Image (tube, rainbow, N blue to C red):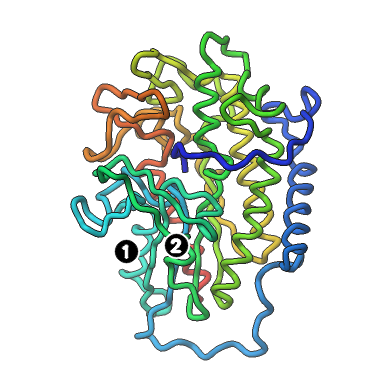
C-alpha cells in the first residue's frame, strides 16, 4: 500500500473547505461519503456504466454444480497490504527468474487462506488461487494501467520491468468463481501523505496538525490535492474498478478487503521518539515524527477510505470484509506482540532492507529493525486470513 511513487494528477481544484469543516476524527462522513459515492456512480453512468449495482442480473436458473475435480477459480487482486512484502518467504523465491518486483510472500493472507482451503476444501471441491497482487498498486493499476514495481529486494540494475494491469494478468472469465480485491490506499496515495505528515511535524508541538491543515486546503507543496478531492477521485476510480472486474468475470462473487486500523484513534499512545512507531530517522536529516494532532487525523483518513470502499462495495452488490474493527488496539503504536501493523521500522524477513531511499532522503533503521513503513506483520496477515477465508468459503457455497 505505502510505496512512494508518482502521485496521480491533482483533483478537481475546488476551493479550500472552511476551517474546521472536517477536523480530526470528526469527519462528516455520511454527507461526504454520500456525495462521493453519488458522484462516482454518476460518472460511471455517463461513461456507459449502470448507476445501479454493477453486478449483472442473476441467471434465471442456477448452473449445475461443478464436479469435485474441477477446481473453483479464485483470483486475488491488490496492493502491498495483500502481497505480504516482508512476511514469510518471497514468492517467487529469491533468485528466481520469475520474480517481478511485486513482493508477494508465503506469509501473506492469500497464501494462508489458499493452504487452509487446500487442507479443507469447501464442499470437497479444490480451490485454485491465482494471486497477481503487487506492492504499490493503485486502483487504476489493478484494472487499466501498467505498473512499474518498486521492490527494494534484488532490484535489477535497470529496474523492474513494468507489468500489465492485474485484471489482464489474471485469468478472469465467466469461469472465475471468486475475486478478492485489496486496493485503494496507493490511490490517495497514503505513502506520500505519511511522508508529508512526517516532514510537517518537524519542530511542531504534539497538539499541532500541520499536515491536516494543508490537506484540508489545497494539499501540501509536494502533494497538491486536497483530501476532499482525493476522496472524490478514489470513489470514481473504485466504481470503475468494480465495474471492470464484473465485466471480465460476470459469474464471480466479488469480495473487497478493507484496511486495518493503522494508527490509533488516541494519538497519546504514540511515542514520537520511537521509530518502531511513527518516527523516522533520515540520514543527514535526523529524527522526524508525525505530531499527535496529525496521527488523529490520519486515523480519520484511514476510516474514511474504508467507509468509501464499504459503501461502494455494497452498492455494487458485493461483499466487504472489515479488517479495521477487529484490529482496533493492534495499530502501529502498540507494543510488539500486540501490534498487527509494524511502524516505520519493525520486524521483517532478513531479505528486507534496513535502509530505504524515500525520494531524495534515506530512511535508516537500527537495532536489527527493517524499513517496514506501516505494513501488516505476520499477526496482521493471520487475522486477515481468518476473515477472508470465511468470506471465500461463504462465496463458494
Q: Which residue is mark 1?
A: 115
Looking at the image, is mark 2 or mark 1 earlier in the sequence?
Answer: 2
Instruction: Give the x, y percent position of residue 72.
Output: 42, 77
Is residue 69 depicted above or below 340 in this figure? below
Which mark identifies residue 95?
Answer: none
Instruction: Give the x, y percent position of residue 109.
Output: 39, 54
Instruction: Give the x, y percent position of residue 351.
Output: 23, 40
Is residue 194 depicted above or below 122 in this figure? above
Instruction: Give the x, y percent position of residue 297.
Output: 62, 28
Residue sitting at 45 percent across and 52 percent down?
147
Q: Is residue 395 left or right of residue 41?
A: left
Which mark identifies residue 76?
Answer: 2
Q: Residues within 10 Å of mark 1 (few under 14, many from 20)?
A: some
Is residue 285 depicted above or below 197 in this figure? above
Residue 321: quadrant of the picture: bottom right
Is residue 100 depicted above or below 151 in this figure? below
Q: Is residue 314 visible?
A: yes
Q: Residues within 10 Å of mark 2 (few under 14, many from 20)?
A: many
Amino acid at each position: 500500500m505505502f510505496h512512494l511513487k508518482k502521485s496521480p494528477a491533482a483533483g478537481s481544484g475546488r476551493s479550500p473547505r472552511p476551517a474546521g469543516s472536517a477536523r480530526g476524527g470528526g469527519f462528516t462522513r455520511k454527507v461526504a461519503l454520500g456525495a462521493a459515492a453519488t458522484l462516482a456512480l454518476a460518472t460511471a453512468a455517463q461513461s456507459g456504466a449502470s448507476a445501479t449495482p454493477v453486478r449483472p442480473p442473476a441467471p434465471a436458473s442456477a448452473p449445475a454444480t461443478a464436479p469435485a475435480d474441477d477446481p473453483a477459480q479464485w483470483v486475488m487482486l491488490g496492493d502491498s497490504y495483500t502481497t505480504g512484502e516482508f512476511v514469510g518467504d518471497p514468492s517467487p523465491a529469491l533468485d528466481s527468474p520469475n520474480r517481478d518486483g511485486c513482493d508477494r510472500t508465503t506469509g501473506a493472507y492469500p497464501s494462508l487462506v489458499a493452504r487452509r482451503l487446500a487442507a479443507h476444501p469447501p464442499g470437497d471441491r479444490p480451490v485454485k488461487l491465482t494471486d497477481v497482487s503487487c506492492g504499490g498498486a493503485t486502483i487504476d493499476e489493478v484494472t487499466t494501467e501498467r505498473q512499474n514495481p518498486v521492490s527494494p529486494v534484488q532490484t535489477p540494475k535497470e529496474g523492474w520491468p513494468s507489468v500489465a494491469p492485474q485484471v489482464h494478468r489474471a485469468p478472469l472469465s465467466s469461469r472465475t468463481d471468486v475475486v478478492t480485491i485489496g486496493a485503494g490506499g496507493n490511490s490517495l496515495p497514503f505513502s506520500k501523505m505519511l511522508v508529508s505528515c512526517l516532514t510537517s511535524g518537524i519542530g511542531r508541538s504534539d497538539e499541532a496538525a500541520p499536515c491536516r491543515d494543508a490537506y484540508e486546503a489545497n494539499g501540501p507543496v509536494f502533494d497538491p490535492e486536497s483530501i476532499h478531492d482525493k476522496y472524490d477521485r478514489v470513489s470514481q476510480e473504485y466504481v470503475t474498478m468494480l465495474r471492470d472486474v464484473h465485466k471480465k468475470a460476470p459469474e464471480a462473487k466479488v469480495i473487497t478487503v478493507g484496511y486495518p486500523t493503522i494508527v490509533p484513534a488516541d494519538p497519546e499512545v504514540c511515542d514520537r521518539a520511537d521509530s518502531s512507531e511513527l518516527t523516522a530517522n533520515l540520514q543527514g536529516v535526523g529524527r522526524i515524527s508525525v505530531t499527535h494532532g496529525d496521527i488523529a487525523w490520519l486515523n480519520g483518513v484511514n476510516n474514511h477510505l474504508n467507509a468509501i470502499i464499504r459503501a461502494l462495495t455494497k452498492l455494487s452488490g458485493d461483499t466487504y470484509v472489515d479488517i479495521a474493527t477487529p484490529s482496533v488496539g493492534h495499530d502501529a503504536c502498540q507494543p510488539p506482540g500486540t501490534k498487527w501493523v509494524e511502524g516505520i521500522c519493525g520486524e521483517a524477513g532478513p531479505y528486507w532492507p534496513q535502509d530505504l531511499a524515500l525520494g531524495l532522503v534515506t530512511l535508516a533503521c537500527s537495532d536489527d529493525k527493517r524499513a517496514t513503513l506501516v505494513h501488516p506483520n505476520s499477526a496482521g496477515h493471520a487475522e486477515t486470513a481468518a476473515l477472508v477465508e470465511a468470506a471465500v468459503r461463504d462465496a463458494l457455497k
